[in-house]
Image: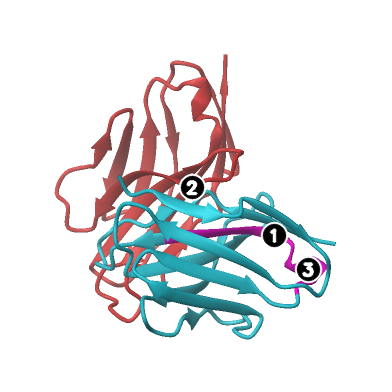
Amino acid sequence: GAVVSQHPSWVICKSGTSVKIECRSLDFQATTMFWYRQFPKQSLMLMATSNEGSKATYEQGVEKDKFLINHASLTLSTLTVTSAHPEDSSFYICSASGGFVEETQYFGPGTRLLVL
Amino acid sequence: AQKITQTQPGMFVQEKEAVTLDCTYDTSDPSYGLFWYKQPSSGEMIFLIYQGSYDQQNATEGRYSLNFQKARKSANLVISASQLGDSAMYFCAMSLLSDMEYGNKLVFGAGTILRVKS
């Protein structure tokens, strides 16, 4: 149980285009989903927390107009990187939990984004 | 603010031996959870083990055990009988259980790269 999928697993796009990444909890209802960014050989950096049906809470320094997050249902959250630029190239990984504070976060397999 | 420290950037262990990955944490909140995740080269984050701050016994999950020393604020991961497939990056993380504003937001350490030698 506790499977989280992420799509696409990798994407290459031209500078200026927008890219949407989907995160789905396959076998449980995810009240809360988290989006992280990870650079090579570094730790995960939390970008935002999203609760189903409400606006996402962004971490300090993360541009909410650049990284649009929508948590439309209890099983789906999307991250849209708008007008992507080469510096947005990174590994983006989502996680989901049932919403109770003591619950474990289960992670998706991640999406590698390369902006040319 | 809470903080996780992993002081070992990299570790080597011989196959079939045990290895301990260090993790210390800092928080003034009495209610917290400690997690260990494994990240192989594929990038996925695999949940390994959880320890709650009020748990009386150390958590164990198969070959993984968490050496929880509350007074020292340490939560070391012990992997017994190492296997080649254990080679990966390992992250220690903490959540504040009483912080309803943030739910179970995790703070991660810098990670430790483990290499298992045959």
Q: Position of residue B28 (x, y in %)?
A: 31, 72
Is residue A85 covered in magenta?
Answer: yes
Looking at the image, which is closer to me, A72 or A66?
Answer: A72
**Is A76 on the left-hand or right-hand side of A87?**
left
> Residue type at mark 3?
Glu
Q: Which residue is mark 1?
A: A90
Q: Which chain is red?
A: B
In space, the residues marked 1 and 3 are separated at their CA atoms by 8 Å
Q: Which residue is mark 2?
A: B45
> Residue type at mark 1?
Ser
Q: Colour of chain A?
A: cyan
* Residue A81 position by quadrant: bottom right
Are the residues flagged by discs 3 and 2 from a single subunit?
no
Q: What are the residue bounds of the magenta stretch? A: A84-95
Determine whether the residue tagged by mark 1 lies in a helix, strand or loop: strand
> From what the image shows, is residue A5 above or below residue B112?
below
Q: Which residue is mark 3?
A: A87
Q: Position of residue B56 (x, y in %)?
A: 14, 49
Determine whether the residue tagged by mark 3 lies in a helix, strand or loop: helix
What residue sits 50% from the left and 17% below the top? B15
In space, the residues marked 3 and 2 are separated at their CA atoms by 23 Å
